[in-house]
Image: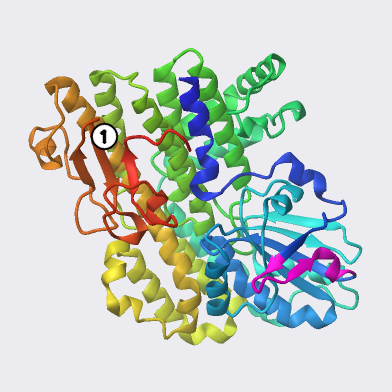
Amino acid sequence: MKRIMTISFLLLFAYFNITPINASQNDIIGKPAPSFTLHDLNGNKVSLSDYKDKVVILDFWATWCPPCIKEIPHFIELYNEYKNQGLVIVGISVDQAGVGVVKAFNRKYKINYPILMADNQVSIAYGNITGIPTTFVIDQAGMIRRMYVGYRDKTVFEEDIKELLPGVLSGQSSTEEEIQPGKYLTELNSVGMAGRPESDNAAPYYKKAIEIYVKEPDALSGKTRNLHEELTSQEQTMLRKWVQDNSPALEQLKLGSNKPYCWFTKQGPTLDVNPHLQEMVELAFVLQARTFLQSENNNINSIIDDLITLYKFGAHISSGPNLSEEKMVGFALKGLSLKSLFFILDSKLLNSASMKSLEDRLNQLATNQNEAFDIRGDKINMQEKVETTFTNLKGYLKSTLEYCDMVAARTPWKLKNDKAILSANTNPWIENIAPAIARSVEIEYRSRTEVRALITILAILRYNNENNSYPATLQELKSAGYLDELPNDPFSDKPLVYRKTEEGFILYSLGGDFDDDGGQQSKWGLGEENGDQVFWPIQKTP
């Protein structure tokens, strides 16, 4: 059982590359930037020392990362505006698919600053990069002055540039002074609340949990995110105490997760990402650490309770009109919960009654998330950005918002096959934001599909326990009353693929390559050799 929880604990890193700042990253702020020599997209060697006496913005990013893509137009504009005054922007791609993919992306987005290909050494040197985008601001003396994990608005970097470059005045632009402060902030807060009573809101409980959260001991720094590594007896004692000290915070987390809605009132003045997002992830790590400790005693019911709490917590963050950057964190937390539940199923520790109980709870969660994909927050954010930054795109705003609505209303399969939507790229803004919007919608469908897949697997296992055989088809499972509805595959026009095998059964989605590869495992069909997203049997390594 302990093995199950250590494997599942790793999956937050694998799911969307989202993680809080670790101690080693904090330690390098205010210190000399680690030197490196990497290859650019043409194979030339480039070193940090080549930019001596420059202010350097060093951005770790990837072509598949929506928040990274959202920042790129800002970096292009900043580089154009300040390169003659001593600014250099360097993108370090952590893509694993190869330089060809990054080259194509670079051409499409017309990136005007240097792009280098990361290696393990540079990622480790800069604090073990595990979350992207991660951006460092380095002054002319080569010292790291700022570090940002996650998306930041253009104005954040511009203020840093104005502070560090001599002769560049700080302050707001005339465009920023002309806008109505709080106009879109008020709209977003109103949409989030939607006239609901405050008693239905989980946010006050989450805020209380954040307030009373006890930070991890320095001696455990980083190890609470890597519990697959063996802890010494002293470290185990500290881990138990840290989890115990956070019992009041976890109780508030559980109380909040039981509320039907969650909305945080943003304070502004602009539509920034929730400032509590990192603390929320910290709380999720405490909760996951508790399940790790409970696994030592095979306390399966308590583990499931905590994992359901974690899922509902993630669902609150990823639902409603929250911004895409916030939703990505919520998707990751839901994914962590579900992957852990998959491994529990594989351990064969649940009898039919326990599986039916878990299935009922998951059905309720799935029913609560059947509403259309909500991009209202992103649309309001776009409107604000048009008035504050991209003023030259005002004429394209209406068609861009309409395009986003069309994308959000379609499954990945329907979007792929809708030529009218795909040919709408005459709008230059759509061409830039379309990949990020489509990616966010796709990840939402992945999350929903995982829940339905888990429900289906529970039903199949119950059927086998009670009939000494697996159903021939999913339709047979439904007809026998074990399944309320067939699990649709958003990457095809059919249900998930199911068939009996010599060892039991297989259940999978076609994944992002949209074809049936016979159940060959690949993370959502996006591996080098394509493949499918296999839910069962469980893959034994993360």
Residue at (37% x, 54% y) in the render: 525
> What element does badge 1 sit on?
helix
In the image, 380 versus 61, the foreground residue is: 61
Mark 1 crowd level (few <14, some 14–19, many ≥20, 10 Å Cα): many
Can you see residue 278? yes
User: Quick check: is 160 in the magenta stretch?
Assistant: no
Relative horizontal placement of residue 464, taking residue 146 as reference (left or right): left
Relative horizontal placement of residue 289, taking residue 335 as reference (left or right): right
Residue 521, position as x, y percentages in the image: 36, 46
Residue 106, position as x, y percentages in the image: 58, 75
In the image, 327 versus 385, the foreground residue is: 327
Q: Which quarter of the rendering shows the N terminus?
A: top left
Q: Which residues are magenta?
A: 39-52
Q: Quadrant of residue 443?
A: bottom left
Residue at (62% x, 45% y) in the render: 278
Q: Quadrant of residue 312?
A: top left
